[in-house]
Image (cartoon, grey):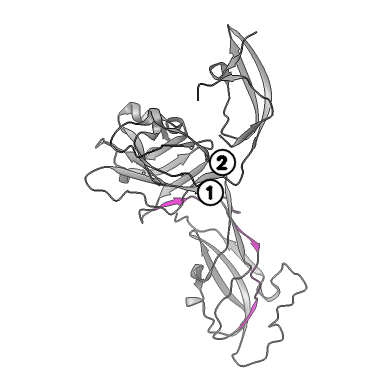
Amino acid sequence: TADITEAMLGNYDRFTVGQKTITVSHLGFEATFNVTYTDANPDKNIEISSNSNVFFDQENTQPLCLTLQYNGINDSRKAIWYIDLATNADTHIWLLYGDDTEYKSIGELKTLGYVTRINAYGDTLIFNLDNDAYLKENVKRIKVLAGFYMCAAAADSWGVDGSANYTEMPNAILRHNTIVENNTRGRWVRLLSSADDALTVIFNPTKTTYKVGDTIDLTGMVVRLKYEDGGTEDVIPNANNVTKPLNGEFTEVGDAIEVTVNVNGQQVKFNVKVTAAGTDNDDDDNDDDDDNGLSGGEIAGIIVGSVAGAGIIGAGVFLFIKKKRKKSI
């Protein structure tokens, strides 16, 4: 008999969930078995912060940035160099550059001499691009794969390689693939799917009838976004998302006055009833027969416009492993 070490395992990744077929290789022989990984701490994780700055506010360098969002994790984040040497960034972070059609991993970019290291400054990852042939402003997209984890340090280690003393940050693991794009405002934007259902209304606004002079009330509205990377997100729009009527104020009477709500560069349109100011409106209480419908404000359509923009895993099988090994740039 022989103890199983991590080096013997194929398709072994304790940082992602799902059913997997594990291969064990030893002395020229192979065996396979299935395991199911589940999320032991679903409320604790990291996410890629959308709408964060693309560039770090620093002169005379090439600082490309990506901000992490830490959910349910209160561990102190230090200013440290070379987090790529203490995490799986080399294989789990990929960049798309200029007119390229294929992403390159951080590991490959380091081999090519385009990326020298990744630093962490609080919640921000800082990519050092020290080659004039690979400029930060030409990086179009960043893809971070599920299972990317962050490390922690007991103290700041800025300007030196202290990676030997970094440790895995418990639960600081990305649960899903995420792709963000550098938009024209110098912000990272998570890309919506090109499918027709990239933006759908899950719950309609509660209020469906108004008077001239009233402003739109989106209370109760929930919109679901489907992203290119396969993820989904439910968002609650507010008055700032309304592009029609102007300033959200109704100025005309009608049974089907169009309202346009902009969410992440996409538009949802629906109609509401607007009566003259000072008149009685039997529908003010909005007691519709269909509790989840709009009656006079049925959704008229969903228009998809151009896009503007350790602790995770509980394994189903316990492996005896000799130890060989977690949120912008």
How far is disc 1 from disc 2 in space, using C-alphas? 11 Å
Q: In which quarter of the image is residue 5?
A: top right
Does residue 302 appear in the picture of this structure?
A: yes
Tag nearer the camera, 1 or 2: 1
Pick whichever of labels 1 and 2 is earlier in the sequence.
1
Q: Is mark 2 on a helix, strand or loop?
A: loop
Query: What residue sits right under mark 2 in the picture?
Result: 175
Position in image of residue 203 (x %, y %): 66, 64
Q: Examine the rendered structure and indicate whether residue 283 appears above or below residue 126.
A: below
Q: Residue at x 39, y 53 (%)?
A: 187
Please determine whether, in this image, residue 299 is positioned above or below residue 71: below
Q: Is mark 1 on a helix, strand or loop?
A: strand
Residue at the far right: name it: 289
Quarter of the image with the N terminus in it: top right
Q: Image height check: is 280 above or below 232?
A: below
Give the image quarter of residue 139.
Answer: top left
| Residue bounds of the magenta highlight | 186-210
Specify the amino acid type for callout 1: Asn
State the image coordinates of residue 234 (x, y, percent, origin top left): 59, 56
Q: What residue did someone put label 1 on?
A: 71
Q: In this view of the protein, can residue 101 be seen by the observer? A: no
Q: Badge 2: how crowded within 10 Å, few (<14), some, or many (20+)?
A: many
Instruction: Provide the major secondary structure of the magenta segment.
Output: loop
Residue at x 47% of width, y 39% of height: 144
Q: In this view, does 317 lie to the left or right of 199?
A: right
**Residue 312 placement (x, y as % from top left):** 59, 37
Q: Which residue lies furthest to the bottom in this view?
A: 278
The amino acid on which the numbered mark 2 sits, given as a three-letter code, is: Arg
Q: Is residue 118 magenta?
A: no
